[in-house]
Amino acid sequence: MPEPLTLHPDRLFPADPATREIARELYARVADLPIISPHGHVPVQWLADDTPFTDPTTLLLTPDHYTNRLLHSVAGVELEDLGVPVGSPMSPEKSREAFRIFCSNWKVFRGTQVQFWFESQFVDVFGIDVRPSAETADRIYDQILERLGTDEYKPRALYKRFNIDFLATTDDPCDDLAGHQQLVDDPTWDSRVVPTFRPDKYLEPARAGWVELTKQLGEAAGVEIGSYADHVEAMRIRRRYFVDHGAVSSDHSHRDARCERLADAEAERLFARALAGEITVDEGDALRAHMVNEQARLAVEDGLVMTLHPAVYRNHDTATFERYGADVGGDVPLPVEFAASLQPILSAYGNADGFQLVVFTMDETVYSRELAPLAGWYRGMYIGAPWWFIDENDAMMRFRRATTGYGTLHKGSGFIDDTRAFCSIPARHDAARRVDSAYLAGLVAEHRLSLDEAAETAVELVTTQPKRAFKL
């Protein structure tokens, strides 16, 4: 008889009975509060068209980098057998076989965040009551497939069931945002889904294809880009287009956090070299830093919150990149420096009215040394929640312990799920709420907070805080 799959009500809570009881009380205050998701990758068209999901694999498994990379690393599974890259053709037979591979290797995920997320999805979303295994794979697959064929499991129905109050997508600056407009124009849609301005590739002058990208940017903005000033104007126009379509933030990810300005003449000179295809890597980095600074300056004008998450060695495995393309899970965190790198924009805009910067990292060493002290001084700076490699339970607890002393509990972003795995959104937010409840319970048990202070803070972390950080 297969082992039953159940969710313990005290999962992620402290082992100490007295502290655990406090965590239970705090968690009860936040467990059912609406989800605010200011940064993620759920395609807006899913909600705009409300087209039923086709199968369990492409919904739950293929988009989840965490799952794929562990199956690749530990079990030796080829990514193509899991449907990677997202959007590649997948027959019903291949979909079922991929799910069998996943279930057969369930032990790979023991003790990981992936196990927590999938168990929550299986039980809470799909009513699965057996543990994944080679023997139960088809049973689980068929049960999920049957549910996906009902109206209750269409994208909009799940969105409402998940109690999502706000959702931001991630979008190219040249996107016409038709899906977002489709939702705005739909009288049956009553929630808020907004785009996010993601200009990274347009700010990397030394990358392959940048000249063509710049041409596309100009066409979208109605500007013929022949100078750096033209580029800035095109960015200003496209940012305003996003603001007019509901955007609240821009999102930036580069190799480092540099943002020093160049003299105007030097910026024009390097931009001309970039348009001619003659710019060097070092020159490209210098111009990119200047362009990032320009985005901060534009943020003061248009009010978009600027989010920054640098220092990722993307597509580390060259063979996998050549075979499957970018963004399939082969990324690795890098060490990063913030204090000197961010000084140019924080000194210029960090206390300016209307400017807000949310800084994320995958380098935990900078929490207490740099990010907490910076957020503890600059009014406009917020500390991004643990995410991407460090959005697991122990790391989220380390984040609170490292940042609260100098960054306080009031200068965080709120939890960020950062996912395309739609059905895992409630599980991810639930994990963060449980960890925060456990952390605050410890402060109460140590007589560092009163219970009413901890309860008020627990609620603020999932309501007031993300609204404040993202100007909702």
Image: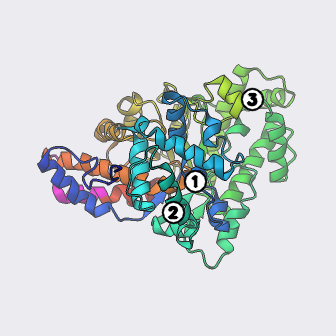
Left or right of 352 in this view: 317: right
Quadrant of the image occupied by residue 114? top left
Q: Secondary structure at mark 3?
A: loop
Query: Which callout, 3 or 1, points at the residue further toward the start of the chain?
Result: 1
Coordinates of residue 144 in the picture (x, y in percent): 51, 59
Label 1 CA crowd tier, 10 Å (few <14, some 14–19, many 20+): some
Q: Examine the rendered structure and indicate whether residue 237 appears above or below residue 159.
A: above
Residue at x-position 54% and y-position 64%: 146
Coordinates of residue 385 in the picture (x, y in percent): 42, 44
Q: Which mark is residue 309?
A: none
The foreground one among 62 and 442 is: 62
What's the amino acid at mark 1?
A: Leu
Which residue is the site of mark 3? Answer: 207
Residue at x-position 59% and y-position 51%: 41
Query: Which callout, 1 or 2, points at the residue further toward the start of the chain?
Result: 1
Label total for image: 3
Identify the main secondary structure in magenta.
helix
Left or right of 328 in this view: 461: left
The question of residue 456 being in magenta is answered with yes
Please tell me whether mark 3 or mark 1 is closer to you in this view. Answer: 1
The way the protein has been coloured in the rendering is: rainbow
Task: State the separation of the CA atoms marked 3 and 1.
Answer: 32 Å
Which residue is the site of mark 2? Answer: 166
Label 3 CA crowd tier, 10 Å (few <14, some 14–19, many 20+): some
Q: Which residues are magenta?
A: 448-458
Coordinates of residue 320 in the picture (x, y in percent): 65, 28
What's the amino acid at mark 2?
A: Phe
Q: Secondary structure at mark 2?
A: strand
Left or right of 310 in this view: 222: right
The foreground one among 194 and 108 is: 108
Which residue is the site of mark 1? Answer: 59
The question of residue 447 being in magenta is answered with no
